[in-house]
Amino acid sequence: MSNASEVLPKLDSELEWQRALYKDLHRHPELSMEEHRTAGIVERRLREFGYDVQRLGGTGVVGILANGSGSANGSGSTVLARADIDALPVTEATGLEYASTVDGVMHACGHDMHAVALLGAAKLLADHRDAWSGTYAAVFQPGEETAAGARAMIADGLAAKVPKPDVAFAQHVMPQEAGTIGTTPGPVLSAGDSLKITVHGQGAHGSMPHLSIDPVVLAASIVTRLQAIVSREVQPGQFAVVTVGAINAGTKSNIIPDSAELLLNLRTYDPDLRKRVMASIERIVRGECAAAGSPRDPQFDYYDQFPLTSNDPAVTERVTAAFTGHFGEHAVFRVAPVTASEDFSELPDALGCPYTYWTVGSVNPERYRKAVASGTVLQDIPANHSPAFAPVIDPTLGIATSAHVLAALAYLSKQATNEVAP
């Protein structure tokens, strides 16, 4: 279907600068919405490749390459490919020679790999315009870790400033065997919601509990009761997770405080179930507050809300076929839905186009297979957000770059331009 055979043989000549840039970005991580250095590097590279470049959402960067005659966007489809670029407030413990030089900040989720892979794909497509026709939009998004970046780009006029895409793509390195790619139709990443709940009591001296309404006891009752939501209110076989990650109350052992704060996290794949679980949380909290005689209604503050990422089946089938045709059936597998969350889907949803999102293996194959054989994957393979998370550069970078090229050419190659986009 595609002209990948004309483009990807040139990948080896690009990997040298890609490896160097990856190490540079890894040494200089930047937190969400503060990716000024990274954005500047991306801007310069895209301009060198011949893209029309603009900033969106503060530190977001978009490069547009229209290739072909006929329409303002080039003849053929329009493809949007996105990479996130922010790092995490994590102190690195990998021991790599190119480890972070920024105290308390680390690319612990592989966004540096995502950025360099997309830049590599952007250059390969720019250098081989005879192999495709259409428009390629390379989007480098800030603030994924805080769910702020996609919304910032949308609020800054993304839909008006970027040609309407026919399809959108994104990928993520994961602690699976390097050299493999995971795809799946339908839900691939869960929706995620964080919630701060404040409950109120009546403070008193620790020696006079009868004069108090103890919010610590109230919070403990709420935590216990919340555990019954998934086990007793969610149908077996449906997925939901309710986590109480923190309880904050009081300052001294002999003082009963007058309020307590609970921090919750919710993960779901089904939008209706998401609403039902939220309603259950609020119902339980209000009920426990009433039972305790709380003098004020509880407060519910939702934040860091991530949408469901649900892959379009037709787009996923087409892209998976391109991957399988190039990498072989042994390297492409159907990945189980991941319980992590992110904000990529807000971009195609705002632009009104279908999308697919795939995973890329990043663990040394020999190490991974040994861990699988011994049953110690969870213990021996650091996951995303771990201080020890360290994707192997090869073959991960080459695979991730190739994946973006293959997905794009599935829609932009001269053969694909004669087909109807899904």
Image (spheres, rainbow, N blue to C red):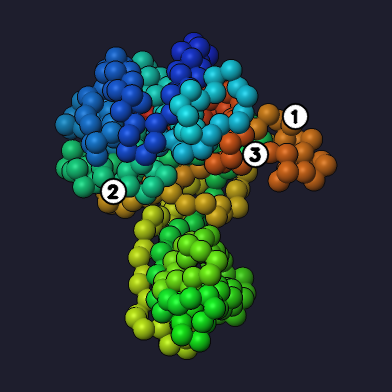
| Mark 3 lies on residue | 382
Quadrant housing residue 329: top right
**Mark 3 and mark 2: Cα distance apart in space:** 30 Å
> Is disc 2 placed on a helix, strand or loop?
helix
Residue 310 in the image, given as x and y percentages of width and height? 45, 55
Residue 380, placed above or below residue 299: above
- Amino acid type, residue under disc 1 in the picture: Glu
Q: Earlier in the sequence, mark 3 or mark 2?
A: 2
Q: Earlier in the sequence, mark 3 or mark 1?
A: 1
| Mark 2 lies on residue | 151
> Is disc 3 placed on a helix, strand or loop?
loop
The circle on residue 4 is: none
The circle on residue 366 is: 1
Is 62 situated left or right of 247 in this image? Answer: left
Residue 109 in the image, given as x and y percentages of width and height? 51, 38
Q: Nearer the viewer, mark 1 or mark 2?
A: 2
Residue 169 in the image, given as x and y percentages of width and height? 41, 40
